[in-house]
Every structure is written in C-alpha cells, then in structure tokens.
Image (cartoon, rainbow, N blue to C red):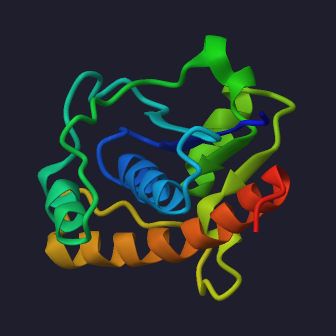
Amino acid sequence: MERVGVLFVCLGNICRSPAAEGVLRAMAAARGLTDRVHIESCGTSGWHAGEGADPGSVAVAMQRGVDLGAHRASGVPVDRLAEFDFLVCMDRQNRRDMGRIAPGRDLHLLLDFDPAARRQEVPDPWARGPAAFEEMYDLIDRACEGLLGQITARLGEP
C-alpha cells in the first residue's frame, strides 16, 4: 500500500505548522486515509523545542474541531527527510532555510495549493491576537484542501 508523507515547516513549530498538521490530519481522517498519509510538522529554529502549540492556535483549532493538545514543537528531522514526499513551508524564509537544510529537495509554499489565494505566505500570527489566528486557519484550511487533492491523486483515490 502506497503511503504519502507530508512535513509542514514554519519557524518555531508552535503556530502555523502544527495548525496545518492538525487540519490536514483531520481532513485525511475524514476521508479514511489515516493509514496512507503520514503528517508531521517542524520548525527551522529550535526556539520552542518541546513546547506545546501556541494557546491562540490551540483555541482556534478547538473551535474548528482540531485537537493540538498533544503537539510538541520540534526541529527539522534531518535524518528522516526522505520519508516525506511533500515538504511544505509556510513562508519564503522557511523555504530558504529548508533549501539550506535539504538542498535539491522540491519545496512548496502551502498557499501554492490554493489557486484562489491572494498571497503566497501564511502570515505568522504569533503575538498578533485572535484575529490573526483566525486568518491563519482560514488560509491553511483552503490550502490543505488543495494539498489533499494532490495527495489523493497520487494515491489513486477519488
């Protein structure tokens, strides 16, 4: 059985990338793809290693039926990058950082998976208040739908 790996990347792994991990995991589960899609997230910095997701991200996630309670921030799993088919960055700086960490790998911006996106980057909501987290989740939700479409196509699923 083919399996697809997705690694979401942001700076600290406490706001955007864990949100994307939770959203895509919930979408994959709703389509019965839990065993066929492996999803993780990481940060390019080690600033928050071991910490839980930002409370603002957790609160908005819970309102949307996504549980981030078990999340613990981590750095890029350099020794396991081959496990991931999609390396998905939240912004251009994350992509530049990943380019140095994983040279030669195909790196995506999450919003490239949303053809209607009016921007290229998911803005970092850290310390910007609840509205910033709401905006972040709206962007992530739409882009994850597009990403899941590419994953299901790769898996030969409808």
Residue 81 picture quarter: top right
Residue 53 picture quarter: top left
Whether residue 44 sits left or right of residue 64 in the image: it is right
Whether residue 85 sits left or right of residue 71 in the image: it is right
Residue 52 percent coordinates (x, y): 19, 35
Q: Most extreme residue toward the top, as rendered? A: 79
- At 84% from the left and 56% from the top, the residue drawn is 156
Residue 28 percent coordinates (x, y): 53, 56
Residue 66 percent coordinates (x, y): 28, 59
Residue 89 percent coordinates (x, y): 59, 50
Residue placed most toward the observer, 95 or 30:
30
Residue 135 picture quarter: bottom left
* Location of residue 104 with respect to 8 vertically, above or below: above
- At 74% from the left and 59% from the top, the residue drawn is 152
- At 38% from the left and 25% from the top, the residue drawn is 74
Whether residue 33 sits left or right of residue 71 in the image: it is right
Q: Quadrant of the N terminus?
A: top right
* Location of residue 127 with respect to 118 vertically, above or below: above
* Location of residue 33 with respect to 41 vertically, above or below: below
Residue placed most toward the observer, 11 or 83:
83
How many discs appear?
0
Residue placed most toward the observer, 52 or 45:
52
Q: Quadrant of the C terminus?
A: bottom right
Residue placed most toward the observer, 56 or 35:
35
